[in-house]
């Protein structure tokens, strides 16, 4: 749980800095992109379950 909270805080700080510097956000701007990232993670975990 600590890693999740640390990731969330780090992401929020990076997002704030990118907005402050008026740079494009370094993340998918649409829900489809976010779902794609989740799909990659789930596929990785499924492989680990099936083959390890």
Image (spheres, rainbow, N blue to C red):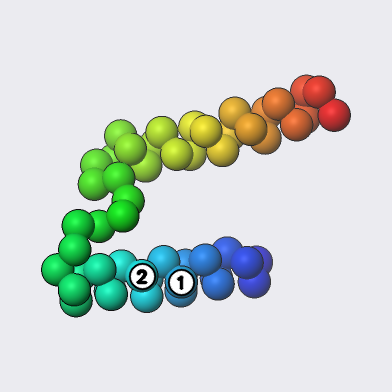
Callout 1: SS: helix
Image check: 7 left or right of 23? right
Q: Find residue 14 and report its image quarter.
A: bottom left
Q: Farthest residue in the right direction?
A: 52
* Of residues 24 and 11, the one drawn nearer to the viewer in this rendering: 24
Query: In front here: 22 or 28?
Result: 22
Q: Quadrant of residue 22?
A: bottom left
Check if mark 1's residue and mark 2's residue have beta carbons within 8 Å. yes
Q: Is residue 16 left or right of residue 2?
A: left
Q: Quick check: 20 left or right of 39? A: left
Depth order, front residue of 24/50: 24
Residue 31 at x, y percent in the picture: 29, 40
In the rendered view, does 49 fall on the left or right side of 22? right
User: Residue at the spot x=78%, y=23% of the render?
Assistant: 50
Quadrant the N terminus occupies: bottom right
Q: Which mark is residue 29?
A: none
- What residue is drawn where x is 49% and y is 32%? 39
Q: Which residue is mark 1?
A: 10
Q: Quadrant of the C terminus?
A: top right
User: How many residues crowd around disc 2 within 10 Å: few (fewer than 14), some, or many (20 or more)?
Assistant: some
**Res 14 label:** 2
């Amino acid at each position: 749980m600590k890693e999740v909270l640390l990731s969330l805080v780090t992401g929020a700080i990076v997002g704030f800095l990118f907005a402050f510097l008026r740079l494009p956000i370094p993340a998918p701007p649409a829900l489809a992109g976010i779902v794609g990232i989740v799909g990659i993670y789930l596929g990785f975990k499924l492989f680990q379950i099936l083959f390890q």
